[in-house]
Every structure is written in C-alpha cells, then in structure tokens.
Image: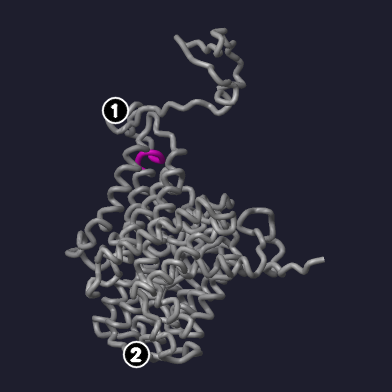
Amino acid sequence: MSRKTAPVSVADPSTETTSPENQKLPVSTAFAYGIQHVLTMYGGIIAPPLIIGSAAGLKGPDLALLITACLFIGGLATLLQTLGIKWFGSRLPLVQGTSFASVATLLAIVNGGGGLPAVFGAVMAASVIGLIIAPFFSQIIHFFPPVVTGVVITTIGLSLVPVAAGWALGNSSSAPDYGSPANIGLMALTLVIIMVLSKLGSGVVSRLSILLAIIIGTIIAVFLGKADFSQVLNGPIFAFPEPFHFGLPTFEPAAIISMVIVVLVILTETTADILAVAEVTGAKIDSKRIANGLRADMLSSAVSPVFNGFTQSAFAQNVGLVAVTGIKSRFAVAAGGVVLMVLGLMPVLGRVVAAIPMPVLGGAGIVLFGTVAASGIRTLSKVDYKDNMNLIIVATSIAFGLVPVVDPTFYSKFPTWVQVIFSSGISSAALMAVLLNILFNVIRRGTPNSPSVFAAAPTRMVPIVVLDALEEGDRCENGKIFDKDGNEVQVETSHEVH
C-alpha cells in the first residue's frame, strides 16, 4: 500500500465539517497553493514598510528588518485568521498582511516628528480599541444585503486594477524602463501563459497556472535581462525580528485618534473581504464569524508593533486567487502563512521572491483582480432591480468608490481624517452603498412605489425548468410552442411551474 502524505489539520474538531473551506489537503499540495498565495500578495505586503521605512530615514539592514518583520507578523496573523482559536479567527481562506489603508496616516505621524515609536504606539492603542468594538461592528451584517456586498466586492476588484497596471509598468516611476514596451510585453506574456495553462493544462496544472506562469515568466525575464538575482546572497541568511528594535512605543493622543479612524476603515474592508471570500467559497457567514475575523485582525495589529510591524488586514487580491484556482481550503492559505513566517525569518528567501520582476506579477494581478470584480458582478446579478431604487444604489456607490481610484488627489485638500476614509475606493463604496441601502430600502417612507428614471427595466429571464423541457427544433410562435414537426407542445399551467 502506498504511503500518503499526511493532511494539514487543526486541533479544534468542532470546525471540521464538509464545507469547502474546511477541505483538508496533503501537505505538499497545501504548500504549493500557499506559495502561490504568497507570490500573489508579496508586492503588496512589502510596499507599506518600504514606503514608511524610507520616510523614517531607514536604510540598509534597518529597512530590511522592517520588511521581514511585516512578513513575519503577516504569517502569524494569517495562521490566526485561518486556523483560529476561541473568539479569534474567521477560519476562512484569508491572507493577512500590512494594510494599505494605514499608510497615509502612518506617513503623517512619521513626518509630524513622532517617528516610528509614535507610529507603533498609535497602531497598538488604536488596535486595542478596535479589538473592543469588533463584536459591535460585526452586528452591521444585516446592512450588507447582496446589493451592498455586490458593490463592495466589485469595487475591491476594480480598485485593485491600477495596482496590477503599476506592477506591469515596472512599479516605480523613477525606474529607467518604467512603462517600456518590454515591461508591458512581459506582463502580456505572463497573462498569455496563464490562459494557455488554464485552457490546456491538467486539473492540477490549471489550478497552479498563476504560480507556474510567474515561474515561467521570471525565467524568461532572466534571459531577457529583466530579472536580477545578484543580490540574493547579499545579507544575512537568518534573522529573527528583534522586539522593539526601533525603540519602545510612544503614545501621542493625536496620532492615536487618527489611527482609530484607520482602524474603522480596516474593520470595514475586512468585513467586506470576509463577505467576499464567503461568496466565493459558499461558506456560511453570521455576525459571530465576522466578529471572530475582526478580532483576529485587531489582535494581530495590536501585537504587530512588538515585532516592528503595522496594522494587519485581509488581502483582497488573494480572494481573487481563491476564485481563480477554485482551491477554497483555508489550510492552503494557512500553509501560505507558514511560508510568510519563514520568509520573515530568512531574509535570503525573501530576497529571492523580491527579485521576481514586477511586470510578471502585473500579468498575474490582472487576472486575479479582474476575477474579484467578476465575483461582485455575479453577486449583483442576484439583486432584484424591479420597482425599486437598487439600480441607483449600485450606480452611485460604484462610481463614488472609483473616484479616488481614478484621481488619487481628489480629497487632497480635505483634512487627514477625510482622506483616510475616502481615499480608499473600497471604504468609499462600502459607506455609500450602506447609507443608500438604508435610505431607500430600510427607510421606506418617501421612496416611490414605481420610481421612473432610476428604476431598471425588468430583466427577461427564462426558468431553467423551461429550457430543460425544450427539445431540438422547438420554436415559439404567437405565444405557442411548436416542435420541429409543427405540432403544438402543450403548456403546463399548474403553479408548480413559474
């Protein structure tokens, strides 16, 4: 009898059901998909520490330590979110990492003279406040019907497309080859490889198409001179994030207040991501499960400054990877969390991944982020648009959410707290969709029964049972159905057929 690889498991048997997110995978398979998750979000997770560290004047080993610290704490947060313990963790396939929502505020704190100690103190204090309010925040789930969740999920995907475009161009406008045909061509080649592998590959190859395309694209980039691995061995092989390496945190009231606003944005985005991944996996979601996920976010964020990290949140791009690959098991993502921890402990491996050309990641990002948007569109297709105001809710919310995506400077003249909230297309769309849903669908008074210009015409749909009853050659004439020989087909008039 052949010996099988032991499956990835978790200690709490109460969570082991037949639901897709609890599917156990062989260790080798779980880590293959886990690495794919890490590669998908790697550029996003290292960008915030690069930006903040550079603003704080860090260079060389200190900047590298900040990056590896964020990888390490991201891995710990991912394990907490996916595997979970009592009261903490949604037990869904969600990858955690440093939140982009906090970057603007953290930069303001650094530039205000507080430095990294003030940043870490503000993150720690605000996260504790977020941990306290998480259960109450989760009670808003009834304000997230499909018309709201569909808007949020669609906006998540659309707002991430510029990220993929930036990667495809070369990620840094200061680079000499930024926006070159060679970079865009490498992105297009990676995209083509993904499509070919998805179309012609076996089941396993198709599901690993993103990872394989990134590897193949990187190899091609090496021969084209677009990838440089010469610095991989330049630095320590192993390094543990030193607690409070940049000094003990300081707690400045203004910085804490601004970070509390960021925490509210993160809670909103994580709620949206939990709902999005639940839509993809078919997992059952209630306020308790959302509260557990939000508590995991906030606990990770509160502990993160100890290891020189920042606020943690779920990564929306990895929701797209779950949808593309069809691998819904949280244990695959948990394996990715282990990989993140290893990368955080072994900078040499992190330098290998960092050497992957950004245009290659851009090709993968276009598929992943587009898939998130498509998932949202699928949710919106379930919404009833007849004789109600749902169309204007969807139209206004998506457009409002895309405003800061199209023009990032739109709110630049507003106070910092306004910029923190509304510079994120995701939180902008979420807030608008929730408010409009309350205005038009919860508060019924004043809403017309038959709205005119903002009401969508009813969508023509044919029940699947009707299609199943039709045969080759059947046709409809003057409200009657005839077969291929011209004989009229009798129509069932009972209430069982709608």
Residue at the location (39% across, 27% down)? 458
Q: Which residue of the protein is positioned furthest toward the left in this rendering?
A: 413
Q: Which residues are magenta?
A: 439-443
Nearer-the-camera pick, 139 or 244:
244
Task: Provide the residue designation for mark 1.
Answer: 452
Q: Dot 1: what SS? A: loop
The residue type indicated by label 1 comes to: Ser
Q: Earlier in the sequence, mark 2 or mark 1?
A: 2
Residue at the location (40% across, 30% down)? 386
Q: Is residue 329 left or right of residue 94?
A: right
Tell me the mark number nearer the camera, choosing from 2 and 1.
Answer: 2
Nearer-the-camera pick, 280 or 393:
280
Residue at the location (53% across, 11% down)? 482
Q: Residue 429's x, y, as percent?
A: 34, 52
Task: Provide the residue designation for mark 2.
Answer: 60
Nearer-the-camera pick, 156 or 113:
156
Q: Residue 219's x, y, as percent?
A: 43, 71
The residue type indicated by label 2 comes to: Gly
